[in-house]
Image: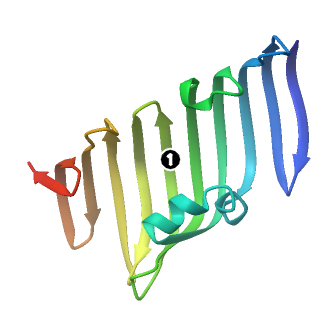
Amino acid sequence: METKHLSFRTQGMDVRLDGSLNNFTSPAVDIQANIDHIKLEQISAYIPDVLEKAQIKISGEADGQLHYKGLLLSPQQADIEATALLKNATLTPHQWTQPITGISGRINYAPNLVRWQNLQGTFKKEVYRLTGELADFSRPVLKTTVASPKLNCEGHFNILHSAVQII
């Protein structure tokens, strides 16, 4: 079964699907979803363990794209790529006295890789811009730049369990 430009609205989000579904007994899909007006608070309900472990709360809006290719019953083995374009989001770490507000920019996810480009937000009345990536989730390597009017730095971190190597 194949669809092109299947559009619908759910929970205030506009969704457009393109793709195919094969084998109804063991469903395999190759689907591209474009989603506008994603309410980050609603998405948070699907990942409470992740947010609780990171001790953060997110709110705001994003547009996104998702490509899923694989068996529906085995998402861990599927080829999944996603892009989020954040628009005026807020990140509230539980241990910080102030949130990061006005977050905008692009975040891309591919297997074993997260990249952020021109990710900008305001913390304590200072605007910061970040570009970087987190690769190799089993032995994470974090590379990022952080820039503001008072700060320009670049970091490269190798992370193994609770040990961090700064390069």
Amino acid type, residue under disc 1 in the picture: Arg
Residue 112 vertical position relative to residue 79 in the rendered view, above or below:
below
Residue 94 position, x and y percent, is 45, 80
Measured as percent of width and height from the top left, residue 166 is found at 10, 53
Q: Is residue 124 above or below residue 31?
A: below
Q: Is residue 33 left or right of residue 161?
A: right
Q: Is residue 23 left or right of residue 120?
A: right
Q: Residues within 10 Å of mark 1 (few under 14, many from 20)?
A: some
> Where residue 18 appears, x then y in whole percent?
79, 23
Where 15 falls versus 22 (above or below)? below
Pick out the residue farthest to the left. 167
Relative side of 156 to 31, left or right = left
Q: Residue at x 25, y 53 (%)?
A: 145
Return the residue at label 1: 106
Q: Residue at x 73, y 62 (%)?
A: 42
The figure's colour scheme reads rainbow
Question: Which residue is at a point 89% across and 28% down the rendered structure image?
Answer: 6
Q: Quadrant of the N terminus?
A: top right
* 89, 166: nearer the viewer: 166
Q: Is residue 101 above or below residue 78?
A: below
Q: Residue drawn at (25%, 40%), measured in percent from left and top?
A: 139
Which residue extends farthest bottom? Answer: 97
Tally the numbered discs.
1
Viewer-nearest residue: 9 or 50? 50
Residue lying farthest to the front in this orientation: 25
Point out residue 38 in the picture as x, y percentages from the top left corner.
Answer: 72, 54
Q: Secondary structure at mark 1?
A: strand
